[in-house]
Amino acid sequence: MLYDTTAKQIIPAAVYQAGVTWYRTDARYFLRRLHAGQKVTVIYETATPETAAVYTFWGYWIGWGELLFTVIGYVVLLQIAYAVTTNPNANSFTRSTSYAPEKKRKYND
């Protein structure tokens, strides 16, 4: 844990070793609570070990960008589906209400 003097709050940090050098990365993320001494998995590229991330599902695999894009995408698709299915023109409405499927035999002779 680090203490941020400008914001006057404690910042969770993950400390890890790559080779002989020790590194520290910011481990805070919205809706993820970490406690002092809690063990977490840290992943990084071997070429740049200083750019590490805490390996969790929420925060690493699913972030705010993906979540926001998904919600906006579903809302847009819902609006498109609603616009397509409401207020049909008169021709298509009469054609859909007067539709009668033709009778077919179950087996061909």
Image (spheres, rainbow, N blue to C red):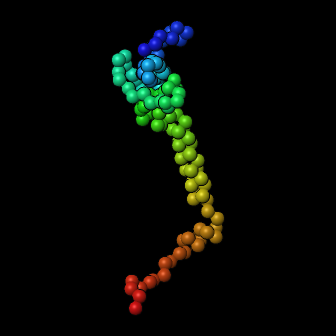
Q: Nearer the viewer, residue 3 or 15?
A: 15
Q: Is residue 31 visible?
A: no
19 to 76, vertically: above or below: above
Q: Is residue 17 visible?
A: yes
In x, y percent, where is residue 16?
Answer: 42, 21
1 to 42, vertically: above or below: above
- Which image quarter: residue 96? bottom right
In x, y percent, where is residue 101?
Answer: 49, 78
Quarter of the figure that contains the C terminus: bottom left
Quarter of the figure that contains the N terminus: top left
109 to 31, vertically: above or below: below
Q: Nearer the viewer, residue 4 or 102?
A: 4
Q: Nearer the viewer, residue 56 or 16?
A: 16
9 to 94, vertically: above or below: above
The total of numbered circles placed on residues is 0
Q: Nearer the viewer, residue 53 or 68?
A: 53
In x, y percent, where is residue 55?
Answer: 43, 31
Residue at left offset 48%, top offset 81%: 102
Residue at left offset 44%, top offset 30%: 43
In x, y percent, where is residue 60?
Answer: 47, 33
Residue at left offset 42%, top offset 21%: 17
Q: Residue furthest front?
A: 20
Residue at left offset 52%, top offset 34%: 64
